[in-house]
Amino acid sequence: MAIKTVLRMGEPCLLMKAAPVAQFDTPELHQLIQDLEDTMQHMNGAGIAAPQIGVSLRVVIFGQKEPIAINPRYPDADTVPYTVLINPELRFIGDKVENDWEGCLSVPGMRGIVPRHLKLHYAGYDQYGNKVDRLVSGFHARVVQHECDHLDGVLYPMRISNLKDFGYSDVFFPNQDFQDD
């Protein structure tokens, strides 16, 4: 088990555009995926991107492995299948945007209302080089957009329309425990 330190907002690696992965199915890539998975599970994250642990590569993971459990940080959210997504490409479907609360392991203790496209198509590869290709909506689409933003040096506070909708989790949600959020 290799739980890594999650970089926090302000760290240079979080503000850079990450490099594409050139080779699949390598020991280094498998170790990175395992480190991301261990760290995400330890932090109860809905997803995590390689730059968040200091690796500037276009790799994200998100979702829940079987058996599917409720994520304590997003108890009311739909379940998202566990996915490794490398060198992702996103295409928004339609113009419909939804505003909803987000948090981030790199912005601990804070939450904000972020506009995100409701539907999208994403494609990329898993760690073995197999094609990943999905059409998704709702919370699944939100998670993908949030994690892929990390690959372009964008953190969710940069997308908040009104800073009145950004603040400490325990102030906005005094009766909820977001655990290291």
Image (cartoon, helix red, strand yellow):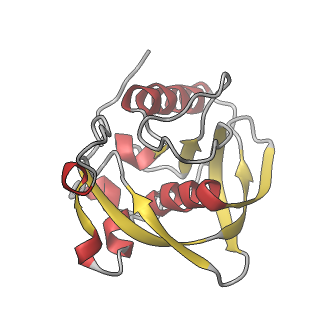
Q: Residue at x 80, y 42 (%)?
A: 130
| Viewer-proximal residue among 82 and 58 | 82
* Residue 154, picture quadrant: bottom left
Q: Is residue 172 left or right of residue 126?
A: left
* Residue 93 location (% of width, % of height): 73, 76
* Residue 73 location (% of width, % of height): 41, 40
Q: Is residue 65 left or right of residue 1?
A: right
* Residue 140 location (% of width, % of height): 63, 54
Q: Is residue 58 left or right of residue 92?
A: left
Q: Quadrant of the N terminus?
A: top left
Q: Residue at x 46, y 28 (%)?
A: 41
Q: Residue at x 66, y 67 (%)?
A: 90
* Residue 106 location (% of width, % of height): 30, 49
Q: Is residue 22 visible?
A: no
| Viewer-proximal residue among 88 and 166 | 166
Please identify the residue farthest to the bottom as the structure is shown.
95
The number of numbered discs placed on residues in the rendered structure image is 0
Q: Residue at x 60, y 48 (%)?
A: 21
Compared with 58, 54 (above or below) is above
Q: Is residue 177 left or right of residue 44?
A: left
* Residue 128, picture quadrant: top right
Please identify the residue farthest to the front as the structure is shown.
175
Q: Quadrant of the C terminus?
A: top left
Compared with 139, 85 (above or below) is above
Q: Is residue 21 visible?
A: yes
